Image: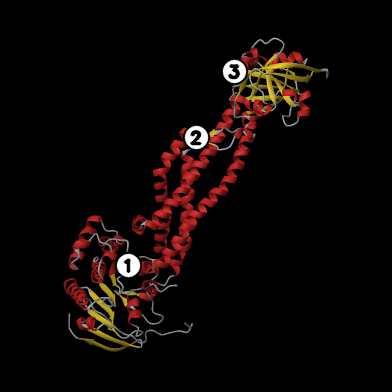
Amino acid sequence: MGKGEFTALKGIDLAFGKGEFAGLIGPSGSGKTTLLNIVGSLDVPSDGEALVLGNSIGKLNAKQAAKLRKENLGFIFQSYNLLQVHTVYENVEFPLLLLNLSTSERKKMVTDALEWVGLTDKVKSKPPQLSGGECQRVAIARAMVKRPSLVLADEPTANLDAANSHNILKTMETLNRELNTTFLFATHDEKVINYLHRKIFLLDGMVDKDEIVKSN
Amino acid sequence: MRLAIKLAFRNLIGAGLRTWLNVIVLSFSYVVIIWMNGVMIGWEEQAKHDMTNWQIGGGQYWHQSYDPYDPFTITDSHAPIPKEFENEVARADMEPILIVQGTIYPEGRMQSIAIKGINPNQNIFSQPTHKLDTVIDGAIPAVIGAMMAKNMNIKKGDYVTVRWRDSNGTFDATDVFIVDIFASNVPAIEQGQIYIALDKLQEISLLQDHVTMLTFKDSEIERSQVEGWTLKTRDILTKSVDDLIKTKSTGLSIFYFILILLAMLAIFDTMVLSIFRRQKEIGTYIALGYTRKEVVGLFTVEGAMYSILAALVGAAYGLPFLGWQAKVGWTMPIDVSELGMAIAQTLYPVYSIGLVMSTILIVVLTTTVVSYWPSRKIAKMNPTEALRGKIQ
């Protein structure tokens, strides 16, 4: 690895509306995960401006960025990133603990979220006891439990078989429709691409094509 | 903070065996440190108690020339009881002792000793001096300590020849009859000395009414200096014990340091490994709304919680053990009479709230620092790389 600079994104000019079900599509190294991380305030742009829910990502300090993520953003990762020693219930409850909600509020919201993903019978299980599909459904429940404005999903089906992938995607599409939550994917998986309502193709850090295939 | 504690507790319990191994090692440190300190405190209390009962009472006035560490001073260290003390002596609240240098000849061997003249009816010391009133034909009744008896091979009922010099410098000798042998934990009142009646010693040494020291019963009464006599309060006389315990405690603190160091090494190692292995988890915490500083705090709390769990586990088996030890004591595997210190063969540990709390505080603080140290690395982590577990 050299110390030379590498430009991951260049000339990106995109805007997303509420309730969109959009995806950043491209091969490895195209910049889709970098863009997703910037939108998720986990990274900052070295140049230009990224506005997320009225917040300029580059100008947020660590506390403000954490607040934005805590209150408004949900994350779904390729490898689920569940807390391994916590139960399904505790994993889904975690974002609500950060919001200082009461126990009864948390219980209702966690139960609702687990119902959305069909895992009410697994509340006491721990991630190592679950299948890959079940783990990703827990991750979706965790991302959705606080009813965020925006959910960012980075290759959410990469570790899943076809049946599980479709299952997961249908769940997310339903949540998008029913809760009007914006979903932004980073993917190169055909199965995911087929579900997207808006497809943004990235190539070498630039937008190659931006097409809306289905209106919300 | 409450959330960090809750999460840290969940993480530790979830980590299973690894957590409990660290907790058991750390709990062992707690119990051993408290027990050993308890033994030291118990020893100090026992030593001071025994010294008070057998040697120093509530404090003493020494003849100004008297130096117990210089035998050459003994010849001149005597004077009549000062007027200031006569009332207290009459009430038996102050006991005079005369010390005369002598030589004892047990089984034909020769040994220098101090002959101590003491009032047979005294009630300040625990020595069985009332036996000195026994009437023996042709010999002076004497009592000696068990350590002296063992070293000289003298038994109760033995006759032993004693020689001394009177105030005119004339040597004289007689037999003493051992009427009793007492056992104490204070070598200073046993080794190289015999006890006979004060008036008898004054008579044979031609030092009528003279004494070397006066021991008072009550240590609480304000005492003033008296010309020709040096006031030695109880605190001054027990300072040697304090110094000894302090020296021993310093030595033991090295042992505590090693003990805590081993426990801390285990925790440090666990934390370093934990931070390396749980990168994705760290990234996830940040993605879900934690700042990196908060994650550092979470891991620090997690490490510090080892010490809290260890205190609880230590209490579970330590309290019965420490309680049992306080009751039956700890009998030392060697013969302590050879050590020359005011130490009992069986020491009874004494524990205080202060001892327990300070031990817990030290261990918790040390564990917190040791946990914080490696956790600082999290503050420098790039969350996007942590999420992928790519930090080396």
Q: Chain of mark 3?
A: B
Which mark is nearer the camera, 3 or 2? Answer: 2
The quadrant in which the N terminus of chain B is found is bottom left
Same chain for labels 2 and 1? Say yes or no. yes
Residue at numbered disc 1:
B288
Q: Judge whether residue B227 can be spotted in this image.
A: no
Whichever of callouts 3 and 2 sits on the residue coming sooner in the sequence is: 3
Say few, some or many: other residues with alpha carbon within 10 Å of mark 1 (under 14 / 14 to 19 / 20 or more).
many
Q: Chain of mark 1?
A: B
How far apart are the two marked residues, 1 and 3, measured between alpha carbons? Answer: 78 Å
Residue at numbered disc 2:
B329
How far apart are the two marked residues, 3 and 2, measured between alpha carbons? Answer: 29 Å
How far apart are the two marked residues, 2 and 1, measured between alpha carbons? Answer: 55 Å
Amino acid type indicated by mark 3: Asn
The residue under the point 73% across, 32% down is B69
In the figure, residue A12 lies in which quadrant? bottom left
